[in-house]
Amino acid sequence: MTAAPRTSLPGLLAARAAETPNAVALTFHDLGIWNPVSWAELADRVAHAANVLAQSGVGRSEVVALIGDNRPEWIVADLAIQAVGAVSLPLRPDFSPERMATLCRQHEARHFIVGDQQQFDKIVPVLEQGTLVHTTPMVLIFEPRGISGTELDATRALIWEKALASTSAGRLGDRTDQLTDHTICTHTVVIENSGDGLVTVEVTQESAGSLVAAAISLKSSLDIHAGDQLYPFANLADPTERSLCEVLGLLVGSIVNLGEGGLLTTLESRSVQPTIAHVPAAELNRMHSDIVAKRAKRGIRRLAVNRVLRGARGEVSRASLPDLVVTYSLGAAWVVTSLIVHSAFRSINGGIRLGIIATLGTVVLAVLVLGGYGVRPFLRKAYGLSRARFLLTGPGVSPDTTKLLSGLKLSPVRERLAHMDVTDSSTTTSAEKTNVTTENQS
């Protein structure tokens, strides 16, 4: 695939659901179990959600703020917003209420879809400012636990599951037939932490064509195929994460595994072992701190882990020197040599034979420990990175973490994917960029 198909993202979903209805589109983690969702089920949910939005007064070209943690409803909501011809404004849930209000006001977000009570509380000030005079705002909530009935009534908020259950699905293709790849369908918000403690927010309007073109560029760089397992370490509002887990899923049929995140991230990624790993700098630095605190002090692995933490001497491809092959080959060589020594030198004193075997074992162990062999696969698997072909990172990776990644042979490491640089000719003139610099509220 070399050219961007002239269609919308909901159109890609409708086509994929018709082509492979029973194939797994995504899975979600709930109570320790990964639950699959097929392409046909995903298309049905998007059609339901699109009808809810249309009946709630969401009109074409209106902006809908989407704020939530990673979950299937996030992807459904984003595609449903586009299916009715509206424009999504994905915002990270860790934004401060002030920054969230500023972005919603600047980009005229008139409707809101939020994940839970914490995110609902952040948009209440926007609703109370009285700036939404041109329309009655629509508010949808994925998880209403903790929000009182009075608050729901005051904001006319709808509960996601109840709203979807009260409407019919219709046919997603009937809506996608009216959409083109030229129409502005979303905003992308890029956050960069600068050295002076400020956060620059770059907001860019994009069409379906530009999103698909960026995803095609990413596919070419990472060699992503149907069936590849993806796990979003970052929030889906992140442009690169969104390209990997939403747009590329529609294009190539990769499988997205949406976990609960937070403290469960390591456990979830370990069970998934994603094929492509896009791990933000904060998560990588946390991984480094965890290894230093917990792994480097455990018995005989201590020297091996310390060797890995110091980093490799040079850039070595994982494919050229598989650690497991080296580990098991050295172990097998020691066993075979021990048997040969034991049988060929029967006339020698048994203590001497045991000394030779022990010496050989010490040499093998020294090679394994000092070379870091054996511990690298253990660490990569422990953090869900044993199968990852590539590791994409953002700015802010500490030098010590870079050494760790080199020692683990997780390469290449990219400072930042130029997501915003890939646009088609139809969107270049209509793209609107604004830069907002505010104090870091975190």
Image (spheres, grey):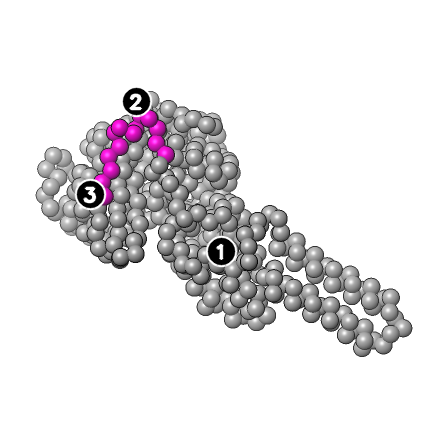
Q: Which residue is mark 3?
A: 104
- For the residue pair 342 and 9, the one nearer the viewer reads as 342
- For the residue pair 54 and 127, the one nearer the viewer reads as 127
For marks 3 and 1, the one nearer the N-term is 3
Taking the view exactly as shown, the residue that stands out farthest to the front is: 314
Amino acid type, callout 3: Cys
For marks 2 and 1, the one nearer the N-term is 2
Amino acid type, callout 2: Gln
The circle drawn on residue 388 is none
- For the residue pair 307 and 37, the one nearer the viewer reads as 307
Mark 3 Cα-neighbour bin, 10 Å: few <14, some 14–19, many ≥20: many
Residue drawn at 13 percent across, 39 percent down: 132
Q: Is residue 142 visible?
A: no
Q: Is residue 433 magenta?
A: yes
Q: Position of residue 432 (x, y in %)?
A: 24, 35
For marks 2 and 3, the one nearer the N-term is 3
The quarter holding residue 138 reads: top left
From the viewer's perspective, is 325 left or right of 311? right
- For the residue pair 277 and 113, the one nearer the viewer reads as 277
Q: Which residue is mark 2?
A: 178
Residue drawn at 55 percent across, 64 percent down: 307
Q: Which residue is mark 1?
A: 405
Task: State the SS at label 1.
Answer: helix
Between the residue at mark 2 and the residue at mark 3, the CA separation in whole angstroms equals: 27 Å
- Tell which tag, 2 or 1, sits nearer the viewer: 1
